[in-house]
Image (spheres, rainbow, N blue to C red):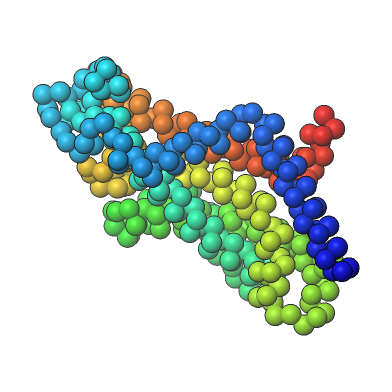
Amino acid sequence: MEDELILRKVEEARKKRLKEMWSVFKNNRMAYLASYVLVAMYLMALVGIFITPYDPYDFDLSRARQAPSLSHPLGTDELGRDILSRIIAGAKYTLGISLMSVTIGALIGVMLGLISGYMGGLVDTVIQRAVDVALAFPTILLAIALIAALGQGVVSLIIAIAVSTFPVYARLVRGSVLQVINEDYIAVVKLLGKDPWYIMFKHVLPNITSPIIVQSTYYMGLAILLTSSLGFLGLGAPPPTPEWGSMIGSGRVYLFSSPHIVVSPGIFILVTALACNLVGDGLRDALDPKSRMFIRRV
């Protein structure tokens, strides 16, 4: 009976905490609106190929570089392809590559950060020196070098961005682990003789998820910009794939004569990356107890 009462109180406290976090996030109107924008973008990426008004790969030079009209709301590109259809179809490439790369980079970085912060000693030194070397290279240059070594393609692009982003996760998680392992409940679990891997994944990792979630949201925006930048340079998805950065790269020579070819995908990149950053700000305030206390006082 006493155990049931304790479990009920824990569950009530958890629900209250979740409700409080949701209230803080919802009160941040910019972040709340940005979350709807992100959901719309990812829904477009999932079902976009089925709702495109035209075939995104069908070209017709007779209608090349047409200005926006009722038949082509965003106009046509240099080969006469409908830009709106290509943007909708290309969302799965730009957003999919970004999501996959951030997920892989986060998994690698979180694992290395956990091991480095918990084990300490020589293991910590080796991992952190490797992280320092990776951080010494500018992100875009490291990604370009990796693509040059792996070859052009979607898989190479995902690997390049993931490798370019994992060091930040490793450094972030290591710092969070060093704070958590000094808590009393970790000392109690160690005295019980639990396996280090059990302690890391059962007791340490659940208590450092907040900064990981916030960092992932910010890095989604960075990954979208990085994916588009590499596509603009011709190092992304090979043509005629309608990736947003590649669309800007192929249409840049018509910037002054037909600006809609470049401006349309550029706006989608800008809005999506900005939405990721705004959602990240909202999640930071919602997940940080200090921020919640400050917001309540205000």
Q: Position of residue 39 (x, y in %)?
A: 49, 39
Spot the residue most to the left: 62
- Residue 31 makes an appearance in the image: yes
Residue located at (56% from left, 36% from top): 35
- Closer to the camera, 71 or 183? 71
Spot the residue most to the right: 2
- Closer to the camera, 67 or 165? 67
Q: Position of residue 132 (x, y in %)?
A: 57, 59
- Closer to the camera, 261 or 90? 90
Q: Which quadrant is the N terminus positioned in?
A: bottom right
Q: Is residue 48 above or below residue 121?
A: above
- Residue 183 makes an appearance in the image: no
Q: Position of residue 7 (x, y in %)?
A: 80, 63
Residue 258 occupies quadrant: top left
Q: Which quadrant is the C terminus positioned in?
A: top right
Q: Is residue 292 above or below residue 144?
A: above
Residue located at (65% from left, 75% from top): 197
Q: Position of residue 99 (x, y in %)?
A: 46, 50
Spot the residue most to the front: 1
Residue located at (82% from left, 72% from top): 187
Q: Is residue 58 left or right of residue 245?
A: left
Residue 55 occupies quadrant: top left
Q: Is residue 130 left or right of residue 47?
A: right
Residue located at (82% from left, 79% from top): 191
Disc tally is: 0
Q: Is residue 204 left or right of residue 95?
A: right
Q: Is residue 136 left or right of residue 185?
A: left
Residue 228 occupies quadrant: top left
